[in-house]
Image: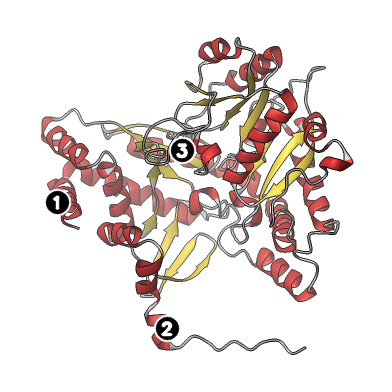
Amino acid sequence: MPQTAYAEPSSRTQLQLPSAYADFVNPEWVRLLDLLGMNVRYRRCAGAELLAEDGRVFLDFLSGYCVHNTGHNHPAIVAALKDELDASGPAMLQSHVADAAGLLASELLRRSGPENTTQLRRSPEAHHLTKAFFCSSGSEGIESVIKFARARTRRNGIVYARGAFHGLTCGALSLMGGDFWREGFGPMLQETYEVPFNNTAALAQVLKQESIAAVVLEPVQGEAGIVVPEPEYLAQVQELCRKHGALFVLDEVQTGLGRTGRFLAAQHYGVSPDMVVLAKALSGGLVPVAAVLMTEEIYHAVYGSLRRAIIHTSTYSENGLAMRAGLATLDVLDREKLIERSDELGRSLRQRLTQALEPYSMVKEVRGLGLMNGIVFEPPQQLRMKLSFQAFKAIHPAMFGQMIVRRLFQDHRILSQICGNNFMVLKVAPPLVIEQQQLDTYVDSITSVVDALHSSAAFWSDALDLGRRAFRV
């Protein structure tokens, strides 16, 4: 049977594309990008560079919120996807054994073992990840965690940390405090409990109820402001979970796949979680894919009989393109030594940023692990800046941070963003393939922007003008 021939879109259709998005997808998003001066159409993306249609080249220091660890459109991953498509294999057959899923699971589990940790904490209670469930997103992975934890423990309660970001589906949203993300969506899951991050005393009090199925944490909190745990915190959480019969779950959606300088951020701290959620960078940023890694005991609690073999599934769970992309991504991480590179470049970058920004009073600190970093700002003490800063906050709490993002983008052609739950922290998360010269450009650029906010009245007046226009839009 001949394949259907599709006509190339006409120039008229192409010209209507921006309008079509505003008309039929999300007009408010278009208006926000227009307001920030960031509504740029990109023609080609490769490595850490984004080529716009007008010829400008931008550096990506956001990585799609830690999606593009291997850079944009890595040739080896693109080639693997082309080969998979050319093979015309059983991509979505559903009633077959997906061999590539087995290969990807084995590789993920091998890399996630406790033998790969920096500080081994070997004990009879060490839990080993032996099975993987594949799905399409980090949010879907968290939904799976909630079900699996309840199946294993026969308890309902889930504990999460203040400032967490686990996704925007209703179950994942139930594990996030604050009104912004929840407002207007009705009641969340019952029996969820918020505790402060880095505070084991508060956690111990909740776990004493003996009704908690799982404690779900990000090993490094991303949207809370790149919050790095105290050295013993995760190990202490693990110990409390074992003591009280709760599962210890790590959401490594942003931190996994080498972002922090280890395959898992957990491996910096020598812990062995009962479940790990991976997503974002797992397919090289090209195909939606996520994985929930779990212990044998959890697997058997969910799937432990022939009758329950398909009790929890996902339509695109093990599709051939996603699995092949995952395998190619792991190969790139290994072959180009990107995990080791993340660790080395991250240490150097934090040191250079700390030194360059130390003279400026509004910069509190630079923190992070690997190439997952944040520049932490604090309110000004000088009266001339304090009044403008308060005016910013009155317009919108994120206004100050977005002005830094806007200046980096417009003046220095650098794409970045502030943290979603902490508007005073600027993310510094380039692809792991970033070159030293590009890091040099970033250090010079952010130093220039920070200098302007401390010395130039134009920074503050431009921002206030932007705020006034926001109200008119």
Q: Amino acid at mark 2?
A: Thr
Mark in front: 1 vs 2: 2
Distance CA(mark 2)–CA(mark 3): 46 Å
Q: Mark 2: which secondary structure?
A: helix
Residue 22 on image: x %, y %? 35, 67
Q: Is residue 198 left or right of residue 301?
A: left
Q: Is residue 282 left or right of residue 199?
A: right
Q: Is residue 405 left or right of residue 203?
A: left
* Residue at mark 3: 350
Q: Quadrant of residue 398?
A: top left
Mark in front: 1 vs 3: 1
> N-terminal of the two: label 2 or label 3?
2
- Residue lying at 68% horizontally and 28% vertically, measured from the top left: 150
For disc 2, the neighbor class at 10 Å (few under 14, some 14 to 19, many from 20) is few
For disc 3, the neighbor class at 10 Å (few under 14, some 14 to 19, many from 20) is many
* Residue at mark 1: 468
Mark in front: 2 vs 3: 2
The quarter in which the N terminus is drawn is: bottom right
Q: Is residue 258 left or right of residue 103?
A: left
Q: Amino acid at mark 3?
A: Arg
Residue 40 vertical placement versus 181 (above, below): below
Q: Mark 1: which secondary structure?
A: helix
Say the numbered circle drawn on residue 13. Answer: 2
Q: Mark 3: which secondary structure?
A: helix
Residue 421 on image: x %, y %? 40, 36
Residue 348 vertical placement versus 215 (above, below): below
- Residue lying at 60% horizontally and 61% vertically, measured from the top left: 286
- Residue lying at 72% horizontally and 51% vertically, measured from the top left: 334
> N-terminal of the two: label 1 or label 2?
2
